[in-house]
Amino acid sequence: MSTELERTASLYRLLFQLPTMKKLLILSVTSSLTVGVTIRLIAYFSLYPINNLIMGIIQGSVILFTPIVLSTLIVRPLLKGNDLVWNTRRLFALSFLCMLFLSAAYLVGAIISSLTNQIILLYIAFILGASLIFMIRLLVFRVMAEFSIPKLLAAAISQPLFCVGAFLLFDPFTSLPRIAETVIMFTITLAVSGTAVALYLWLVNRPLLKALGVGGLRFLYGFLLDWIENEPRVLEESFEKIGETTSLPVLTLLFKHSNALSSVLVVPNIHPGPFKNVGGSEMPHIIAKHITEKTGAITSVAHGPSTHGQNPVSSKEIKKVLQAVESSLKQSNFTSRASQFVRYTEDEVKVSCQIFGNLALLTATLSPTSFDDISPTLGEQIIEAAKSEGVEDAFLIDAHNCGGEVVTPILPNTETAKKMIHAAKMAVRNAITKTSTQIKMSAAQSNLKTLGKPEGIGPAGITVYVIDISGQKTAYIIIDGNNMVPGLREKIIDEIQKTGIQEAEVMTSDTHTVNAVSLNPRGYNAVGQVGNQEELVTTIAKMAKEATANLQPVKTAHTVKNAEKIKIVGEKQMNLLTSQIVKSVSTAKKSLLLIILAMLLNTLIPLLLFVS
């Protein structure tokens, strides 16, 4: 998913950081009574001030506060199936917000009416306020709920209807002609408002509906539902409609001590996104947990070359990845042949290689230069380049370990891509000359209690593999996170090397379960961005020491198998989705003119018809 989608999602949590129900009640009562008294004193001050004070309290209660309660009670039963988002507190908060808008119009009307001595202007202002909150409620309920049209209209009109009814009953100057005028005004403004909102939503919905067959409002509702209540159903249904079925490779690298598996490293060329619990976001944790429970081996998941186009459309697709990994556990071709760790650097590009059996395991990074995903096409090119150096098999890990303010994917046919291909060839060429038949290894795994998703570290925690080939100790550190702040990789490696380990690489799984859980502009915190960085570095160094102290002779085996018939979003669809969301946002901004014009029309028509 693009950063545009993540940033869009990051806005919605703000809408639902609401006060408690008790505070909302106090605010509502206080505001309603204050507005009621203020308006009576402005509009009718010359007539019995003490009486107006009492009547202001009554009117504030009846005209402003009571409709909040009644509309909440009436709309609540209409929300069957939407209860996750629209609980009583949120309904009450929406009605309270609408009351504030209505009060603002009411106050302006009272001031103008008092200055001009035309009481009809107070009626017009109130009706304009009522039509405004009808528009707000119509927009909100259409975007953030699944309603039939009759239920949608009932939910939207309930509060303004109660407000207007109470206003007519409790205004001292109400007469039958005035009631007729008010009803006509209200009917006209509702028709204009409803038409404007319908047209506005059609324009906003159209780009995505036309391009992908799924409306933009459906996507938006899905984002909101998952963002607010961790319910991915609607969003995953939308992704399933636009997705494509394919097969994607998964590397499973096994380490066996005696007759038991001791460690497993899994590298899927499948992207763990888009965010929270949607699609493949929890894939690294799910795979690691499942394989560890099944085998007892320490398991971690690294990031293979993949972008948001390779996001599974739903969490159900992770089972297909698990099937590929599980079938790889039955290997029997274990060997003790391996090479020392070799790194080749070309300008900003760093590619390492370590050979296990007949597999050249490559790791690529640009750190401390900021970067994002390595495209799968480039990954394939790097693997082919590696094989051309004489290894039977090769696989690439995208270290995904340096994300600054601006992160861009590494695409084929760029200067960076060419350097990466050449560095991979040279790394493999050098590693081939440093093979051995003695492997020792151990692994350590930890979940930091003080660092979790808000700090950018997912539930799979941190895994440290230490591999000893002929006295050269190498640490592979995999953090279940989405990228790292610039410089943190280098800090960790420096600390690791103080423990007597010669080589190291730090990677993140690129889990997107940490995305959309913070109010960071990007929608997530990279590892090291918040929280105690020193604690993280120290913990990893301790884990490396622990693993080093437990080094044992092992044999290794690997398999690359496809996750068959896995449904992903797809590059083409992802690009369309991103571009059309941007287009929808632009359309939404431009189309606000419709809402403004509707309000102007709602103002002009009553003035022309009822003001002499």
Image (cartoon, rainbow, N blue to C red):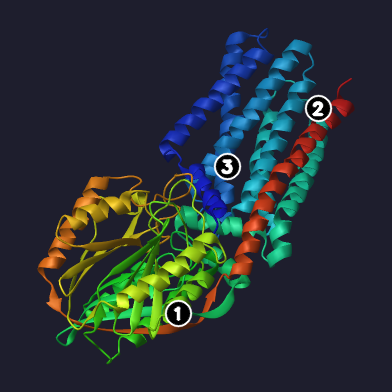
Can you tell which of label 3 and label 1 is closer to the viewer?
A: 1
- Name the residue type under label 2: Arg
In x, y percent, where is residue 41?
A: 62, 13
For mark 1, does the 10 Å Cα neighbourhood hold few (<14), some (14 to 19), or many (20 or more) residues?
A: some
- Numbered tag placed on residue 178 in the rendering: 2
In x, y percent, where is residue 422?
A: 45, 69
- Name the residue type under label 1: Pro
Quarter of the image for the C terminus: give it. top right
Q: Relative to the observer, which residue lies in front, 403 or 243?
A: 403
Residue pointed to by mark 3: 70
In x, y percent, where is residue 294?
A: 26, 81
Q: Is residue 589 above or below residue 143?
A: above
Can you tell which of label 2 and label 1 is closer to the viewer?
A: 1
Local SS, label 2: helix
Identify the residue shown where x is 47% and y is 52%. 228
Quarter of the image for the N terminus: give it. bottom right
| Label 3 or label 1, whichever comes before in sequence order | 3
Disc 3 from disc 1: Cα separation: 57 Å
